[in-house]
Amino acid sequence: MKPIEWLGKKLKIIDQTQLPGKLAFLELRAYTEVVAAIKGMKVRGAPAIGVAAAYGIALGAQDIKADTKAKFLSQFDKILKAFAAARPTAVNLFRAIDRMKKVAETAGDVAETKQALIVEAKKIHAEEEVATRRLSQLGAGLIKNGFTVLTHCNAGALATAGYGTALGVIKAAWEQGKKIEVIATETRPLLQGACLTTWELMQENIPVTLITDSMAGYFLSRGKVNCVIVGADRIAANGDTANKIGTYTLAVLAKENSIPFYVAAPTSTIDFSLSSGAEIPIEERNPEEITSIKGVRLAPKGVTAANPAFDITPHRYITAVITEKGIFRKPYVDKLQKLLGE
Ligand code: MRU
């Protein structure tokens, strides 16, 4: 499965909003189409958003008509701004934007810069593939034969344009021959767990049971879960983690029931500029995602609804952060910074 594929003059992506009913692909030819795909959740998940944005920026650069580098950079800046405004929480997006900006500023003339941007986008993609594979191998060591693992949202190949993070760990344990079972939460309001996580696991024949988000306490309190693994959209330097709304609830429930709670993410998801989770911007999405499901209205017309898309899990609830550079346990600040040399 290739959730994101660069085809030279266009970007091919799986339209995640069509799954599991239809495996549909979109071919995006303009950067504005890539921005719209990110805003519309056709491509979603922190690492995948970063990869799509990098290719989208490279795509936009190819269409710039400028006879001087200064004119090129001024038009290029508009493209970067459009991506930066697409979604606020996943730091991989901003990391990709920064890298593409740096390449544009340091490369040679306009023609060379356009080429260098394609090379950099491919590099970002390749790095995510390697990192997610490596962290999955490392994390699989935490999963024992016979484990039941609970996961939330979707942190598989679709969300990472690679091997997966939380689901990557699960897949790697399965590939090592461990008999494991997965409990996937449906993940209201957009149902990434119900639509995407179950679909990805079923492709691999990994046993999965779907539950509603509100059933998690029941399963965690009855000894039916050995560990919880989730992905991340941004991790602050102290280990506080922004992830899909509902993650914090799971972490508190896991602690209450003495169940290990793991966060799996590539180091591109760690934001060392933020000392704690309180500084992570949380996306507020359209309340219609709460009052309707797939276009069918459930709640009374005119009702007030709130829709924060992510929450922050304080580091004290996180047993370990699984990255491609190692598995980190508390206290996170020194350990993460030392190992990554930040
Ligand atoms: O809003 P989304 O679907 O882009 O959510 C992001 C996520 O996929 C999850 O929060 C995920 O657990 C972390 S990203 C691999």
Image (cartoon, rainbow, N blue to C red):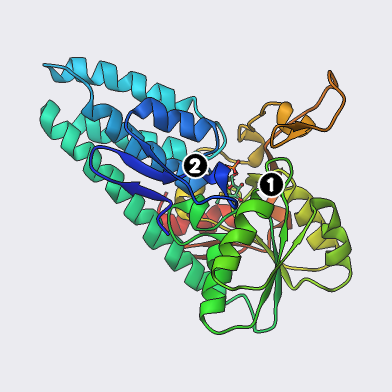
- Which amino acid is tagged 1? Leu
Residue 107's tag is none
Q: Residue at x 16, y 17 (%)?
A: 66
Asked which quadrant contains residue 256, the reply is: bottom right
| Residue 14 in view of the camera | yes
Q: Nearer the viewer, residue 239 or 172?
A: 172
Say what secondary structure mark 1 lies in.
loop
> Is 335 placed above or below 207 here?
above
How far separated are the C-alphas under marks 2 and 1?
Answer: 14 Å
- Which amino acid is tagged 2? Val
Q: How many marks?
A: 2
Say what secondary structure mark 2 lies in.
loop
Mark 2: few/some/many CA within 10 Å (<14, 14-19, 20+): many
Asked which quadrant contains residue 152, the reply is: bottom right
Q: x, y percentage for residue 249? A: 79, 50
Residue where numbered disc 2 is placed:
43
Mark 2 and mark 1 residues within 8 Å of each other at the beta carbon: no
Q: x, y percentage for residue 335? A: 53, 59
Q: Residue at x 63, y 44 (%)?
A: 242
Check the picture and name the quadrant holding the N terminus. Answer: bottom left
Q: x, y percentage for residue 309? A: 67, 37
> Is 21 placed above or below 260 here?
above
Q: x, y percentage for residue 130? A: 37, 62
Dot 2 or dot 1: first in sequence order is: 2
Residue where numbered disc 1 is placed:
191
Q: Nearer the viewer, residue 74 or 273?
A: 74
